[in-house]
């Protein structure tokens, strides 16, 4: 089979959106530049220390990914929504449990009947 002579990268663009306050917002795909800057953002978050000091940094990250969304609307989200939105931006499905976390009713992994020494 012959190789194509044209590669249309636009065909590989994934479109995602988020609904905030009943209004759909387009979520911009992460650019190579933003990917490279992610390390700087992680460093800023570590340097910020407290969660309270980290929030403005996270709001800036979100604002950079959502089209036509004022910072005030992002600041109006509750903390749970903020964290879910950050996960979604990073490509994590918020409906999926984090790795290593059990669903209710799911059996525990590991040996049964083991006891600690007293």
Image: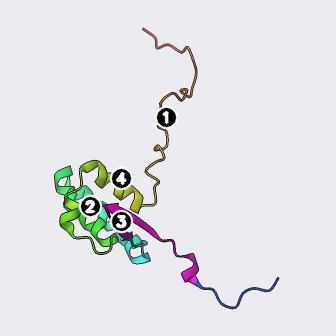
Q: Residue furthest front?
A: 22
Residue at left offset 46%, top offset 44%: 98
How far across and down, in percent of the image, does residue 69 sit? 26, 70
Tell me the residue that label 4 is attached to: 84
Circle 2 SS class: helix
Identify the mark nearer the N-term, 3 or 2: 3
Find disc 1 in the rendering and name its residue. 103
Task: Tell me the CA gap for discs 4 and 2.
Answer: 12 Å
Q: CA distance from mark 3 to mark 2?
A: 13 Å
Q: What whole-number distance in Å separates the C-alpha atoms at marks 3 and 1? A: 32 Å
Residue 71 coordinates in the image, percent (x, y): 20, 67
Left or right for 109, reference 80 = right
Q: Residues within 10 Å of mark 4 (few under 14, many from 20)?
A: some
Q: Is residue 39 above or below residue 11?
A: above
Which region is colored magenta?
9-26
Element type where label 3 sits in the image:
helix
x, y percentage for residue 106?
54, 29
Q: Nearer the viewer, mark 3 or mark 2?
A: 2
Quadrant holding the N terminus:
bottom right
Residue at image position (48%, 71%) is: 15
Please rate how many residues cluster around mark 3, counting C-alpha atoms within 10 Å: few if below 14, some from 14 to 19, many from 20: few
């Amino acid at each position: 089979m012959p190789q194509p002579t044209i590669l249309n990268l636009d065909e590989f663009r994934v479109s995602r959106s988020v609904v905030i306050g009943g209004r759909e917002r387009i979520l911009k795909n992460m650019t190579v530049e933003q990917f490279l800057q992610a390390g700087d953002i992680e460093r800023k978050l570590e340097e910020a220390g407290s969660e309270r000091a980290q929030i403005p940094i996270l709001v800036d990250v979100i604002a950079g990914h959502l089209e036509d969304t004022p910072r005030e609307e992002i600041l109006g989200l509750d903390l749970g929504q903020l964290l879910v939105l950050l996960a979604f931006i990073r490509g994590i499905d918020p409906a999926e449990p984090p790795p290593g976390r059990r669903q209710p009713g799911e059996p525990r992994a590991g040996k049964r009947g083991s006891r600690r020494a007293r």
